[in-house]
């Protein structure tokens, strides 16, 4: 029984592939490497470089490797970018998912796990946010993921497929052993930017909006460690394999930290100060987003291991320091060559 992971060389996908490989699963990856890195994959895991929306490729991989479950990560995730170029997000997130679903249905795959987002909720009426909350996305990113969720629901109903859609809150951190982490140049994740500032790779960190109705005026987010998120997917896979019904589940810790608290956590674990510049709110940003996690905890056999902001920040910092050392080594090698 093989698991196909789309986007498996990316930030979250590579942690997923590592977790599956460590659990003894047979894994195969499709990734176009636009934001992924083949070196993050465990040795021996087959990588097919291509698009998750290439139906011929997907069907060939499923057939050749006996794929019985698909975990779909491939997609674009930057909210401000989606505001500037919405059609790219509808192509890469919505249309790609449609093609992938078509290929899985034709190939007889009956289990599907989808990487969704809390951005589908928009500004919620209540916090923590339950899965039953209205979906009113504020960005094309959120809308593109919500459209994919709707397609997944309808496809599963029509074709006897069971699925779990996991609505991520804010994914952060890195592999505790620093084997992989967020390496995309120009990444917009708050913790990534903060540890780049702490390691001297950025002159400052920008805070967008200090006049929100929150205790310190900055946005509040529910961070989840990327390794805990990978284990939530493993738990979802086990749930589906034992006959679990299709579900949509929030994936967070159920507690919120402000942008300013997050910056302070990075200062604490790094022992370094760095400049912060305050600016106006950004279009598409949500004020407060905290998960109601009662359903995922009741449904899946999943217990987070890294539910602590400073632990998340420490792992992100260790990864960033490793990246920085490697880059410096490459520069020194190039200079001496």
Image (spheres, rainbow, N blue to C red):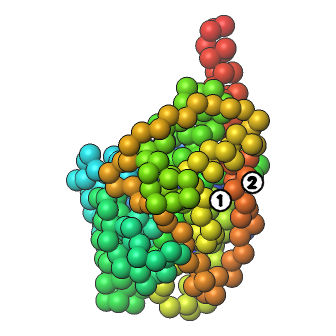
Is 56 positioned to the left or the right of 323 in the image? Answer: left
Residue 112 visible = no
Image vertical order of residue 201 relative to residue 138, above or below: above
Is 264 positioned to the left or the right of 72 in the image? Answer: right
Regarding mark 2 in the picture, which secondary structure is present there?
helix
Label 2 packing within 10 angstroms: few (<14), some (14-19), many (20+): some
Q: Which residue is mark 1?
A: 225
> In the rendering, at what x and y percent does residue 139 appear?
31, 59
Q: Residue furthest top?
A: 336
> In the rendering, at what x and y percent does residue 328 appear?
66, 21
- For residue 327, what is the image quadrant? top right
Look at 39% across and 90% down and name the residue there: 160
Regarding mark 1 in the picture, which secondary structure is present there?
strand
Image vertical order of residue 36 relative to residue 276, above or below: below
Look at 45% across and 67% down and name the residue there: 118
* Closer to the camera in the image, 166 or 196: 196
> In the rendering, at what x and y percent does residue 240 appear?
56, 84
Label 1 packing within 10 angstroms: few (<14), some (14-19), many (20+): many
Q: Earlier in the sequence, mark 2 or mark 1?
A: 1
**What is the quadrant of the N terminus in the image?**
bottom right
- For residue 270, what is the image quadrant? top right
Distance in Å between CA atoms under marks 2 and 1: 9 Å
* Closer to the camera in the image, 93 or 6: 93
Is 100 positioned to the left or the right of 25 in the image? Answer: left
Look at 49% across and 42% down and name the residue there: 207
> In the rendering, at what x and y percent does residue 313 appear?
69, 48
Look at 51% across and 60% down and name the residue there: 214
Q: Are marks 2 and 1 in contact (CB under 8 Å)?
A: yes
* Closer to the camera in the image, 157 or 42: 157
**What is the quadrant of the C terminus in the image?**
top right
Q: Which residue is mark 2?
A: 311
Q: Which mark is residue 55?
A: none
């Amino acid at each position: 029984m093989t698991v196909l992971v789309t986007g498996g060389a990316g930030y979250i996908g590579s942690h997923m592939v590592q977790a599956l490989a460590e659990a003894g699963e047979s894994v195969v990856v499709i990734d176009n490497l636009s934001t992924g890195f083949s070196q993050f994959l465990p040795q021996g895991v087959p990588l097919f470089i291509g698009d998750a929306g290439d139906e011929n490729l997907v069907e060939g991989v499923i057939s050749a490797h006996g794929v019985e479950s698909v975990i779909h990560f491939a997609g674009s995730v930057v909210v401000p970018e989606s505001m500037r170029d919405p059609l790219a997000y509808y192509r890469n997130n919505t249309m790609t998912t449609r093609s992938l679903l078509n290929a899985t249905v034709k190939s007889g795959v009956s289990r599907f796990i989808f990487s969704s987002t809390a951005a589908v909720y928009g500004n919620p009426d209540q916090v923590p946010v339950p899965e039953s909350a209205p979906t009113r996305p504020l960005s094309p990113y959120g809308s593109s993921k919500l459209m994919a969720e709707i397609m997944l629901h309808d496809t599963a109903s029509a074709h006897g497929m069971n699925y779990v859609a996991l609505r991520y809150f804010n994914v952060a951190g890195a592999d505790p052993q620093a084997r992989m982490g967020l390496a995309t140049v120009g990444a917009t994740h708050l913790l990534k930017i903060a540890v780049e500032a702490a390691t001297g790779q950025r002159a400052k960190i920008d805070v967008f909006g200090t006049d929100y109705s929150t205790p310190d005026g900055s946005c509040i987010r529910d961070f989840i460690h990327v390794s805990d998120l990978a284990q939530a997917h493993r738990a979802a896979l086990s749930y589906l394999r034992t006959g679990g019904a299709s579900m949509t589940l929030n994936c967070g810790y159920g507690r919120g930290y402000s942008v300013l608290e997050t910056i302070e956590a990075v200062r604490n674990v790094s022992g370094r100060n760095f400049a912060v510049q305050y600016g106006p709110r950004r279009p598409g940003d949500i004020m407060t987003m905290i998960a109601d996690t009662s359903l995922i905890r009741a449904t899946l056999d999943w217990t987070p291991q890294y539910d602590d902001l400073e632990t998340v920040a420490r792992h992100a910092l260790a990864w960033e320091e490793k990246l920085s050392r490697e880059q410096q080594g490459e520069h020194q090698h190039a200079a001496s060559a």
